[in-house]
Amino acid sequence: MILNYLRKNPDAGDTLEGITRWWLEQEKIEISVDRVVEALESLVQKGGIRAQKVKGGSTFYKVNKED
């Protein structure tokens, strides 16, 4: 679901909260934050997206265009 959103919006990037609230709700998908965390961690490990710590301690996720 997250990769589908990024395919439609390749320049998108957001925090866990933003992804859960805006990306998935926009797609009319109800999913727990824990499942979103698991999916994000898996996508980071596989190299599909990258995670970057930002000011305030949040993590910002964005498609990994380097691969």
Image: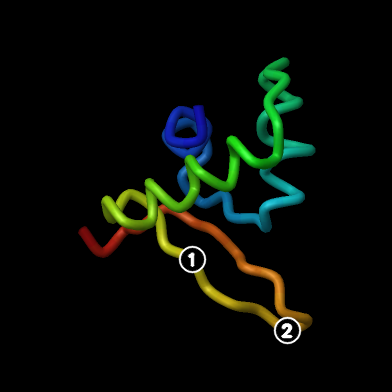
Q: Could you tell me residue 53's position as x and y percent?
A: 59, 77
Task: State whether residue 59 is above or below residue 16.
Answer: below
Badge 2 is on which residue? 55
Q: Nearer the viewer, residue 9 or 32?
A: 32
Task: State whether residue 6 is above or below residue 17.
Answer: above
Q: Residue furthest front?
A: 34
Q: Is residue 46 left or right of residue 11?
A: left
Amino acid type for the residue under numbered disc 1: Ala
Q: Is residue 17 left or right of residue 44?
A: right
- Looking at the rendered structure, the secondary structure element under dot 1 is strand
Q: Could you tell me residue 38's position as x and y percent?
A: 51, 44
Q: Which residue is found at the position 79% from the left and 38% from the top? A: 21
Amino acid type for the residue under numbered disc 2: Lys
Q: Could you tell me residue 22's position as x and y percent?
A: 76, 37
- Counting every numbered tag in the picture gives 2
Q: Which residue is found at the position 59% from the left and 35% from the top? A: 35
Q: Which residue is found at the position 60% from the left and 65% from the top? A: 60
